[in-house]
């Protein structure tokens, strides 16, 4: 029999500025008539034990989706690690899974596969990869990395890859589900999916 798994908090990362889309709050931009964050919440919700939203603008609109909303503790839009940092601090459970607000097609088995990879390798962090493309904002990690991340950010570190390089990381392949990682950064990309 499998050992029961540790519980997981899901964090939807919606704290960016959407500059490539003209400075919009990407999570609230509609794809096929529904905000992108709603697609992500719908897919992540059944995979985790708690679901929370990291957003730095429009907190009330995000709260309407029925999950706790919190901003970065480190101001100035320093990137996704600030969202992960705030998520690790808010999470009720020992494991934290992240997904960005702008990848609406995410896998139904994202968290299960990241968890299997993390457990098999006894790693600190599992991250998704398709072919030669890493997907650093799709990760599962241990909440107890918070002090380590805090020190990295306090020292001026901002790059996700550089922080991962300091950890025991396992890459989990999703080559069979590459479409699930399609990411929408521009109006043109939005239009290409909006049909
Ligand atoms: N908390 C937080 N999340 C961020 C920040 N910057 C980006 N993100 C999130 O990180 C993920 C990937 O970021 P991008 O695709 O670059 O999104 P973005 O920064 O809003 O868009 P651009 O301004 O066009 O780069 C998305 O889920 C963003 O919401 C930030 O400063 N703080
Ligand atoms: Mg960005």
Image (cartoon, rainbow, N blue to C red):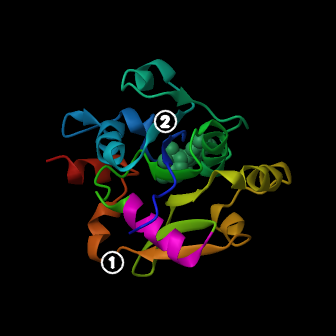
In the picture of the structure, the residue carrying the numbered disc 2 is 52
In front: mark 1 or mark 2? 2
Depth check: give the residue in front, 144 or 26: 144
Q: Residue furthest top?
A: 60
As for residue 27 lying within the magenta part, the answer is no
In the picture of the structure, the residue carrying the numbered disc 1 is 175
Depth check: give the residue in front, 178 or 16: 178
How packed mark 2 is, by other alpha carbons closer than 10 Å (few <14, some 14-19, many 20 or more), is many
> Of label 1 and label 2, which has the lower sequence position?
2
Residue 175, compared with residue 89, is above or below; it is below
Q: Is residue 157 left or right of residue 155?
A: left
Spot occupied by residue 159 in the image (x, y as percentages of width and height): 68, 61
Residue 145, compared with residue 68, is above or below; it is below
Spot occupied by residue 43 in the image (x, y as percentages of width and height): 30, 47
Q: Which residues are magenta?
A: 111-123
Q: Cβ of disc 2 within 8 Å of ligand 1?
A: no
Q: Is residue 175 left or right of residue 70?
A: left
Could one spot residue 23 in this view of the protein? no
Spatial CA span between label 1 and label 2: 28 Å
Q: Residue furthest bottom?
A: 132
Which quadrant would the N terminus be assigned to in this image? bottom left
Label 1's element?
A: helix
Label 2's element?
A: strand
Q: Is residue 39 left or right of residue 168?
A: left
Spot occupied by residue 193 in the image (x, y as percentages of width and height): 22, 52
Q: Residue at x 42, y 39 (%)?
A: 26
């Amino acid at each position: 029999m499998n050992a029961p798994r540790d519980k997981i908090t899901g964090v939807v990362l919606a704290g960016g500025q959407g500059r490539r889309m003209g400075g919009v709050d990407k999570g609230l931009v509609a794809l096929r008539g529904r905000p992108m964050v709603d697609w992500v919440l719908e897919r992540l919700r059944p995979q985790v034990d708690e679901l929370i939203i990291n957003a730095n603008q429009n907190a009330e609109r995000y709260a309407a989706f029925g999950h706790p909303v919190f901003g970065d503790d480190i101001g100035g839009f320093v990137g996704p690690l600030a969202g992960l940092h705030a998520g690790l601090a808010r999470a009720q459970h020992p494991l934290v899974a992240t997904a960005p607000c702008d990848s609406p097609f995410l896998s139904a088995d994202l968290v299960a596969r990241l968890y299997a990879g993390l457990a098999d390798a006894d790693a600190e962090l599992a991250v998704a990869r398709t072919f030669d493309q890493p997907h650093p904002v799709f990760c599962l990690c241990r909440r107890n990395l918070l002090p380590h991340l805090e020190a990295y950010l306090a020292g001026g570190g901002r790059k996700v890859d550089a922080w991962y390089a300091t950890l025991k990381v396992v890459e989990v392949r999703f080559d069979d589900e590459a479409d699930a990682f399609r990411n929408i950064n521009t109006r043109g990309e939005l239009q290409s999916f909006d049909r």
